Amino acid sequence: MSDTPPKPDAKPDPKPDGRTGLEPDRQVGQDGAVRDKLVATKEQWARDGRALTGHAADPARDRLPPGQRLVTDWPVLDLGITPKVTTANWTLAVDGLVENRLSWNWGDFQAQPQESFVSDIHCVTTWSRYDNRWEGVSARRLLELARPKPEARFVVFHSFDGYTTNVALSDFDDDGVLLATSWEGQPISREHGGPVRIILPKLYLWKSAKWVKRIELLASDRKGYWEVRGYNNHADPWLEERYSD
Ligand SMILES: Nc1nc2c(c(=O)[nH]1)N[C@H]1C(S)=C(S)[C@@H](COP(=O)(O)O)O[C@H]1N2
Ligand SMILES: [Mo]
């Protein structure tokens, strides 16, 4: 392991040509099955009465955040330190401004109701991957047990590799937010943050801490590893909140 941490994620190429990410050299344009699925999804959204904005002629545009391109693999991105966390030595603490601190091992985690969600993931390095099936314990379940104090408004995730990242409690306490243990029916691999990582699908993926070991609730915000290095504090891909300012 080198002493110097790897560079932050490369800044995305500017797209002065206004390309959509759906040109023929990109995966979606070549993959009729993916396109059909997108059309089907949009039709489902329409049936659900879900509000869609603009780009009606291009179903993919409503699902792909600005400046993103679709991939079908799942790239690995982290500080380059892959901690040796196993189900035998994994522990999780939930502390700070909670009525009931939690301290879980793998057995405690497995004793919780396991839920399944399908979500898209969006990385600030401009790739997005659709329809990831996750299983694990929901953030909502964890919060129900830990019971945040009224003054708790922010969350910091701490990981076994020393990484930290911060979100508003309202973004953690949301639909589809998971402490995920499985992806596409398989345990999440070590390189992707197994045995347990956060999946917070509405924000760029750097907010989804891999190898999570501690969830700290705070009254005031405290920036994490990338946030102090110029990445956006909120990180909403739909607003392209990549960098601060
Ligand atoms: N513990 C930990 N979690 C982390 C990181 C990290 O370095 N350490 N990197 C973040 C970043 S910058 C990204 S883009 C995603 C990448 O997740 P992946 O490697 O599973 O694609 O993990 C995030 N979570
Ligand atoms: Mo990243």
Image (cartoon, rainbow, N blue to C red):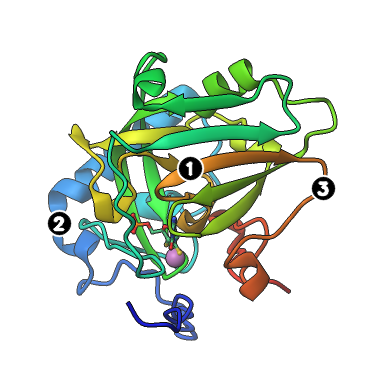
> What residue is pinned by disc 3?
220
Label 1 residue SS:
strand
Q: Which badge, 3 or 2, is on the more N-terminal residue?
A: 2
Residue 153 left/right relative to 241: right
The crowd level at tag 1 (other Cα within 10 Å; few <14, some 14-19, many 20+) is many
Residue sitting at x 36%, y 53% = 60
Q: Front-most of 97 and 78?
A: 97
> What residue is pinned by disc 2?
31
Q: Front-most of 127 and 111?
A: 111
Image quarter hosting the C terminus: bottom right
x, y percent for residue 46: 44, 30
| Circles 1 and 2 in contact, beta carbons < 8 Å | no
Q: Which badge, 1 or 2, is on the more N-terminal residue?
A: 2
Callout 3, which amino acid? Ser
Callout 2, which amino acid? Asp
Does residue 106 appear in this view?
Answer: yes
